[in-house]
Image (cartoon, helix red, strand yellow):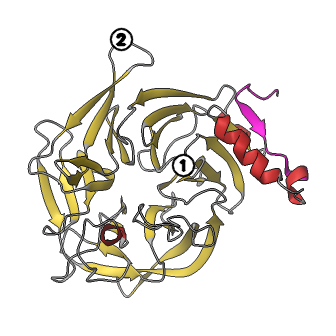
């Protein structure tokens, strides 16, 4: 089957024994390229389908409006911005991206305000009929987990604001287990960015049971736990460690290529009536940037937003391919029928994969 025009095969033979400057030249070429798809393993072709495409659906020349969350609710996508400035203070804007009725490729962006306000929202996930946001908090306000209705007037309700009286660092990303428990990461990025006080807790991953209020730290070995997702059978939990990037973008050496840019897999096991993480193993290391948001499809393939787009690995850890986007992708979400929506800071893209590809969170 001939490759689509926007798809290329990675040259393994040339890269296995690198000639001087090969990868530098390749990276430079990609920076000038338009978005597309790169095949590392032939199994990626079945994910792409016969006619993969990627199109720009929204753009803002000044603000990084498309940074985190990416929660697909009834055809709309709820997203959070990167840090913006207003009256000398940092804030995050929540937006709803909707397809315009009667058009095939036009989307409308509506800036929305939760009531009460959510302080510096970050990651999010489908929860009940709305969105569960990670609320980073401020220097004077605790963060945690906050539910927001997907309908106006976007009422918000805090579910968790502390660990036994101690404030969280800056809750980053969240996923929901089928038993109703909420698992989330809490790296110290907020302190580095000047939006949170000195940390009161280590960088943990937590499990919270909203039914009885039980809150437990379940992982403490990652330096900066970030994105997380369950495998389709929920027998494994994937967590990214993004300590290769400092939170303070004003600091020289904000990105360290020798730092963690890793995805770890853990077995989710039940012992004595409680859930634990066991058998930690390195699943993948991102060759470009850091792996931020992470999700699985229903076949168990693992997708993560990295420095040059979305990387896709088989469940066995083999890199299958990349959805290449210049400038990278912090987070993303699946839509219906093989759709993916990629958050690229000042741009938002829609990728169309094979129609049989379904995100595991919603199974659409």
**Toward the viewer: 199 or 114?**
199
- Which secondary structure is most common in the magenta stretch? loop
Q: Position of residue 345 (x, y in %)?
A: 43, 43
Q: Alpha-carbon neighbours of circle 2 within 10 Å: few (<14), some, or many (≥20)? A: few
Q: Residue furthest bottom?
A: 272
> Element type at marker 2?
loop
- The answer to whether residue 3 is magenta is yes
Res 7 → quadrant: top right
Q: Pointer 1: what residue?
A: 297
Q: Classify the position of the N terminus by image quarter.
A: top right
Residue at left offset 24%, top offset 70%:
196
Q: Pointer 2: what residue?
A: 102
Res 228 → quadrant: bottom left
Region rendered in magenta: 1-13
Q: Is residue 132 visible?
A: yes
Q: Position of residue 344 (x, y in %)?
A: 47, 42
Residue at left offset 39%, top offset 65%:
248
Q: Examine the rendered structure and indicate whether residue 172 appears above or below residue 323.
A: below
> Element type at marker 1?
loop
Residue at left offset 76%, top offset 46%:
26
Q: How many marks?
A: 2
Determine whether, in the image, residue 313 is placed left or right of residue 217.
right
The alpha-carbon separation of the residues under discs 2 and 1 comes to 29 Å
């Amino acid at each position: 089957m001939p490759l689509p025009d926007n798809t290329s095969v990675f040259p393994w033979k040339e890269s296995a024994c690198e000639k001087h400057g090969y990868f530098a030249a390749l990276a430079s070429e990609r920076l000038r390229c338009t978005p597309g798809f790169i095949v590392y393993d032939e199994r990626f072709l079945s994910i792409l389908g016969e006619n993969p495409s990627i199109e720009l659906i929204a753009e803002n020349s000044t603000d990084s409006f498309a940074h985190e969350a990416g929660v697909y609710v009834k055809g709309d996508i709820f997203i959070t911005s990167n840090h913006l400035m207003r009256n000398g203070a940092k804030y995050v804007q929540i937006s709803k991206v909707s397809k315009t009725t009667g058009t095939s490729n036009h989307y409308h962006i509506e800036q929305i305000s939760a009531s009460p306000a959510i302080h510096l929202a970050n990651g999010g996930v489908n929860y009940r009929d709305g969105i569960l946001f990670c609320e980073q908090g401020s220097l004077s306000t605790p963060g945690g987990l906050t539910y927001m209705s997907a309908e106006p007037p976007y009422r918000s309700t805090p579910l968790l604001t502390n660990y036994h009286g101690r404030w969280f660092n800056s809750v980053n990303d969240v996923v929901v287990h089928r038993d109703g428990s909420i698992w989330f990461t809490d790296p110290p990025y907020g302190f580095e960015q000047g939006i949170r006080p000195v940390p009161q807790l280590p960088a943990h991953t937590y499990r919270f049971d909203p039914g009885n209020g039980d809150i437990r730290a379940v992982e403490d070995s990652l330096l900066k736990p970030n994105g997380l997702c369950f495998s389709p059978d929920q027998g494994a939990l994937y967590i990214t460690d993004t300590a290769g990037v400092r939170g303070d973008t004003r600091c020289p050496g904000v990105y360290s290529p020798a730092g963690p840019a890793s995805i770890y897999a853990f077995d989710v096991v039940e012992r004595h009536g409680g859930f634990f993480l066991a058998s930690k193993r390195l699943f993948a290391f991102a060759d470009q940037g850091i792996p931020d948001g992470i999700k699985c499809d229903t076949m168990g393939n693992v997708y993560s937003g990295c420095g040059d787009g979305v990387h896709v690995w088989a469940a066995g850890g083999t890199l299958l391919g990349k959805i290449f986007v210049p400038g990278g992708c912090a987070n993303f979400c699946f839509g219906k029928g093989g759709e993916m929506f990629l958050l690229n800071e000042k741009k938002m893209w829609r990728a169309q994969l094979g129609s049989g590809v379904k995100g595991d969170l919603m199974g659409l």
